[in-house]
């Protein structure tokens, strides 16, 4: 399978989980996807739970059109920070409305809950956020 010509947005904020960010980034690029890192601010350096830095290519608020194919949200504690920014939540909501593929890993379901896009869907998440998510959709 090749993803040549596909554009994927990878959300980031401080305290992201390393493997849940770097593996998707590298594997998607290996398959030919153009992966852009999106944070609350463009050009900001965000650090992982273990201190690994990554710089954002774009700010969520600068993405007006839904001109991408997929959105990946890594876990860690970053999603709890991301959902404090209306631009980040709005990007996830617009991606859902446009029928884009959205991957939410582990704690990233927090973002789906904040974007209010999980009602009527089955999702999985890290067990400690079950209560945060349960009232906004189905858990499996």
Image (cartoon, helix red, strand yellow):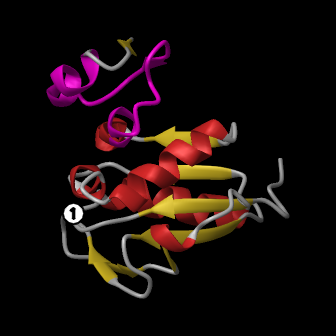
Image label count? 1
Residue at horizontal 80 percent and vertical 56 percent from the top: 3
65 is within the stretch colored magenta: no
Q: Is residue 73 visible?
A: no
Return the residue nearer the eye: 83 or 109: 83
As drawn, which residue projects farthest toward the bottom?
Answer: 43
Give the residue number, with chain letter if any, for mark 1: 15
- For label 1, count other residues whose C-alpha is less than 10 Å away and answer few (under 14), some (14-19) or many (20+): many
Image-quadrant location for residue 116? top left
What residue sits 34% from the left and 32% below the top? 113
For the record, the magenta segment spans 111-134
Left or right for 66, reference 36: right
What secondary structure is found at the residue carrying circle 1?
Answer: loop
Q: Position of residue 71 (x, y in %)?
A: 57, 51
Where is residue 79 shown, x and y percent of the image? 29, 51
Residue 96 at what x, y percent from top left?
59, 38
Q: Position of residue 87 (x, y in %)?
A: 41, 61
Residue at image location 72% in from the left, 52% down from the top: 69
């Amino acid at each position: 399978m090749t993803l040549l010509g596909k554009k994927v947005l990878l959300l980031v904020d401080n305290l992201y989980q390393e493997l849940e960010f770097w593996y998707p980034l590298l594997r998607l690029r290996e398959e030919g996807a153009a992966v852009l890192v999106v944070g609350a601010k463009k050009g900001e350096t965000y650090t992982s739970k273990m201190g690994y830095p990554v710089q954002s290519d774009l700010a969520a608020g600068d993405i007006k059109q839904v001109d991408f194919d997929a959105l990946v949200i890594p876990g860690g504690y970053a999603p709890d920070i991301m959902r404090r920014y209306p631009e980040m939540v709005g990007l996830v909501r617009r991606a859902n409305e446009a029928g884009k593929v959205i991957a939410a890993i582990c704690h990233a379901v927090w973002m789906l809950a904040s974007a209010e896009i999980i009602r009527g869907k089955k999702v999985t998440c890290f067990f400690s956020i079950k209560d945060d998510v349960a009232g906004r959709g189905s858990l499996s």
